[in-house]
Image: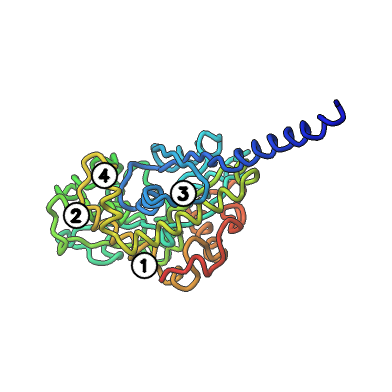
Amino acid sequence: MLALLSGPMALTCVGAANGQAADEARQPVAIQFSYDRPLESSMAPFVVAQDHGLFSAEGLAVGTNIANGSPEAIARVASGASDLAMVDINELIRFRDQANAPPVKAVFVLFNESPYAFVARKSRGIRALSDLEGKTIGVADSDFSIRMWPALARQNGIKIANVKLNRISAAVREPILSAGQVDAVAGFSYLAAVNLRDRGVPASDLTVLRYADHGCEAYGFAVIVNPALAAAKPEAIKGFVRAVIAGTHLTIKDPERAVDEVVSRMDGGTRDLELERLAAVVSDNILTGEVKRNGLGGVDPARLERSIDQIGEEHKFRKRPAAADIFDDSFLPPVAGRLMN
């Protein structure tokens, strides 16, 4: 009898084990994702991916949190407190130069061009980059853009000593420019310029001097990943990237709906302001010529190397990281799946 029963019992145990394995395989992979700043419309591709079920379709359960700047978001990913984060890739370059820095890498670039810019008043005599000589620029202590200033000044024949930098809090950047206490401010074009227009400064009086238009090679915001998670669950990371690419397509196709979804999650968000902000981000930072040729999300390694050199004009590297230390393209889908129509 034992012999007769052993066969069915064994089959039952095997079936139960297989069922348990199948259930585990169907369980979504939990992902904790950090934004490096409070939510606004430049993050729309991630919000859209969440709201439209694109993450869940990839078998992911994505939770979000907000860090206080890119350095903090990078630290969260490095420690494993977050799995992925959107950060300024140039902050990652500096992070990787630290002694014993974990090998955190970017796996997807959303901003093909950095948003670094000087925003100035034409009424203060600034219409071109060269007009900054003899002027005062308000610079927030946490603003990475000014760290690219030495390379930008050299490329454009500007004497740094002739430009006065006034250190300020980021909270007063737009107010002091609108009040005429400085001639220009350093920051992000899609934030400072749009915020100033919202404060009543007419667009006709604003000069937006984008670093990217004057020789700065830097990329902008990118998704970074915890190296242990990348090694253990590469398919989950690939799925996250695919969902963000699909979310970017939907954002560009229907920006009004995308902004509505972002504003619904913001404290005191203004729809018209965020629509203007998103339009600037898409045209200036996401849909660049490089992206139209090569697809969304990747980098040109030679350009990334040059941007690291530009950072090196202000920052003395302990050991200069290479492009391969900063960006891993193995999680990207083929180019055909990244082209922007």
Q: Which residue lies furthest to the top in this view?
A: 2
Q: Do the residues labelled 1 and 3 touch (CB within 8 Å)?
A: no
Q: Which amino acid type is shown beneath numbered disc 3?
A: Phe
Distance from disc 4 to disc 2, alpha carbons, whole Å, reads 13 Å
Amino acid carrying label 2: it is Asp
Q: Earlier in the sequence, mark 2 or mark 1?
A: 1
Q: Which of marks 3 and 2 is nearer the N terminus?
A: 3
Q: Residue 55 carries which label?
A: 3
> Is 218 or 61 nearer to us in this picture?
61
Quadrant showing the C terminus: bottom left
Distance CA(mark 2)–CA(mark 1):
27 Å
Q: Is residue 156 above or below residue 117?
A: below
- The residue identified by callout 4 is 264
Sequence-wise, the earlier of marks 4 and 2 is 4
Q: Tag 2: Cα neighbours inside 10 Å, few (<14), some, or many (≥20)?
A: few
Q: In which quarter of the image is residue 1?
A: top right
Q: Where is residue 32 in the image (x, y as percent from the top left)?
A: 48, 39
Answer yes or no: do the residues labelled 4 and 1 have beta carbons within 8 Å? no
In terms of secondary structure, where does tag 4 sit?
A: loop
Task: Residue 168: give x, y in percent of width and height.
Answer: 28, 41
| Res. 297 visible in picture | yes
Q: Which of the two residues, 70 or 312, is positioned nearer the viewer here?
A: 70
Q: Distance between the residues labelled 3 and 4?
A: 19 Å
Q: Name the residue at 42% across, 51% down.
A: 147
Q: Nearer the viewer, mark 4 or mark 1?
A: 4
**Left or right, residue 305 beside residue 163:** right
